[in-house]
């Protein structure tokens, strides 16, 4: 049953009323419950529709199953125990025996995944670190404790051993660190600073998007302030803002800016095309104008306070320079 491929599970009276992850683990004994949970959360489990209707992806391991329901479980081909080492240029800001901090360029995928199996940050880190990696989860690989979207640039910290991986993961889970993003948005806020707070969950229709929800989901909080307006003072074409994350939810900054009515320039998911005033470079910017500018945290072994601040990347700065000429 652990072979890659699609497996169909029909719920009978023996597992009716159980959690989905437990019911599937019972039906597929070669899979552990944690493995089943991971498959569900990675959107590889679907509920069959009635009479050959469309399937519905299920993402809640705790969902209670009903007798007669049929679930399709797609088990992917096993990945290599260790991604391949591939040398890529990296902008290393700090490195010691425990961790590495770098300035990730836009366009670089962090972790191998379907559609991006190699030439990722992980592949580059394995090549860069070599034997200095002492093993994450028993395998020589870097410990990714937070991710940036492919088209988001900026500062990241990566663990080089298990102890540091666990310690950094605790810091991020407790939000006991400082993360500040620079973000260019359409229009401008009426106030100079504020916060966005609310529940974030998957969009009920488009599962690739996140959405603000009145209930359910996970709590999110972003503190923001205005840094610069471009264009007329009362109706700016765009604004440069800073956003400090007090939580770290998927797409948090992009979703929160859109919630404010200030979508991120170049955002293909939460933004929108503009045909009004503004330079052509603003309308045609080919990625979301989002940069992880500042990261501050306590080194988990030495106790040293570390702070890293990165400049806007070239394409982002060129756009700012052009906007400075807008009247």
Image (tube, rainbow, N blue to C red):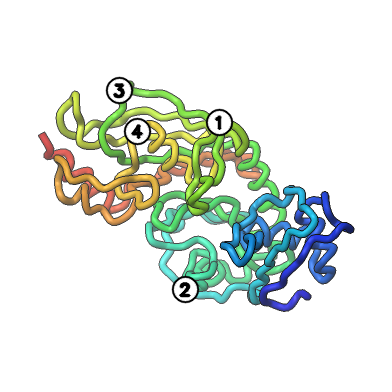
- Element type where label 1 sits in the image: loop
Of the pair 79 and 131, the residue shown nearer to us: 79
Q: CA distance from mark 2 to mark 3?
A: 46 Å
Image x and y of residue 72, in percent: 68, 66
- Element type where label 3 sits in the image: loop
- Mark nearer the viewer, 2 or 4: 4
Mark 2 touching mark 3, by CB under 8 A?
Answer: no
* Residue that badge 4 annotates: 261
Which label is found at residue 133?
none
Which comes before the other along the chain, label 2 or label 3? 2
Looking at the image, which residue is at 30% across and 31% down? 227
Which comes before the other along the chain, label 2 or label 4? 2
Q: CA distance from mark 1 to mark 2?
A: 46 Å
Q: Callout 4: 10 Å neighbours few (<14), some, many (20+)? A: some
Which comes before the other along the chain, label 1 or label 2? 2
Q: CA distance from mark 1 to mark 4?
A: 18 Å
The reply, left or right, for residue 137 in relation to residue 243 is: right
Residue 201 occupies which quadrant of the picture?
A: top right
- Element type where label 4 sits in the image: loop
- Element type where label 2 sits in the image: loop
Looking at the image, which residue is at 56% across and 69% down? 126
Mark 2 touching mark 4, by CB under 8 A?
Answer: no
Image x and y of residue 33, in percent: 80, 59
Q: CA distance from mark 3 to mark 4?
A: 11 Å
Mark 3 touching mark 4, by CB under 8 A?
Answer: no
Residue 119 to residue 151: above or below: below
The quadrant of the picture occupied by the N terminus is bottom right
Which label is found at residue 214?
1
**Is residue 97 something one can see in this rendering?**
no
- Mark nearer the viewer, 1 or 2: 1
The quadrant of the picture occupied by the C terminus is top left
């Amino acid at each position: 049953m652990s072979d890659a491929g699609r497996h169909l599970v029909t719920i009978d009276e023996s597992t009716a009323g159980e959690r989905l992850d437990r019911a599937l683990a019972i039906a597929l004994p070669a899979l552990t419950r944690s493995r089943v949970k991971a498959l569900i959360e990675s959107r590889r489990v679907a509920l069959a529709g009635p009479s050959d209707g469309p399937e519905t992806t299920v993402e809640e391991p705790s969902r209670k199953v009903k007798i007669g329901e049929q679930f399709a479980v797609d088990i992917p081909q096993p990945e290599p125990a260790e991604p391949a080492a591939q040398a890529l240029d990296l902008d290393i800001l700090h490195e010691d025996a425990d961790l590495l901090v770098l300035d990730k360029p836009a366009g670089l995928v962090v972790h191998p995944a379907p559609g991006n199996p190699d030439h990722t940050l992980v592949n580059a880190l394995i090549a860069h670190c070599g034997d200095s990696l002492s093993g994450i989860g028993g395998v020589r690989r870097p410990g990714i404790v937070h991710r940036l979207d492919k088209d988001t640039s900026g500062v990241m910290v990566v663990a080089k051993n298990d102890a540091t991986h666990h310690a950094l993961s605790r810091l991020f889970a407790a939000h006991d660190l400082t993360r500040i993003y620079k973000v260019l948005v359409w229009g401008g806020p009426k106030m100079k600073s504020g916060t966005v707070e609310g529940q974030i969950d998957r969009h009920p229709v488009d599962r690739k998007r996140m959405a603000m929800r009145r209930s359910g989901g996970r709590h999110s909080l972003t503190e923001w302030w205005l840094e610069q307006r471009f264009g007329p003072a009362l109706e700016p074409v765009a604004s440069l803002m800073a956003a400090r994350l007090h939580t770290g939810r998927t797409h948090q900054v992009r979703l929160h800016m859109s919630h404010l009515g200030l979508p991120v320039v170049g955002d293909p998911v939460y933004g929108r095309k503009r045909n009004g005033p503004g330079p052509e470079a603003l309308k045609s910017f080919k990625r979301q104008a989002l940069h992880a500018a500042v990261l501050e945290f306590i080194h988990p072994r030495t106790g040293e306070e570390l702070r890293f601040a990165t400049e806007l990347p070239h394409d982002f700065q060129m756009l700012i320079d052009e906007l400075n000429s807008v009247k």
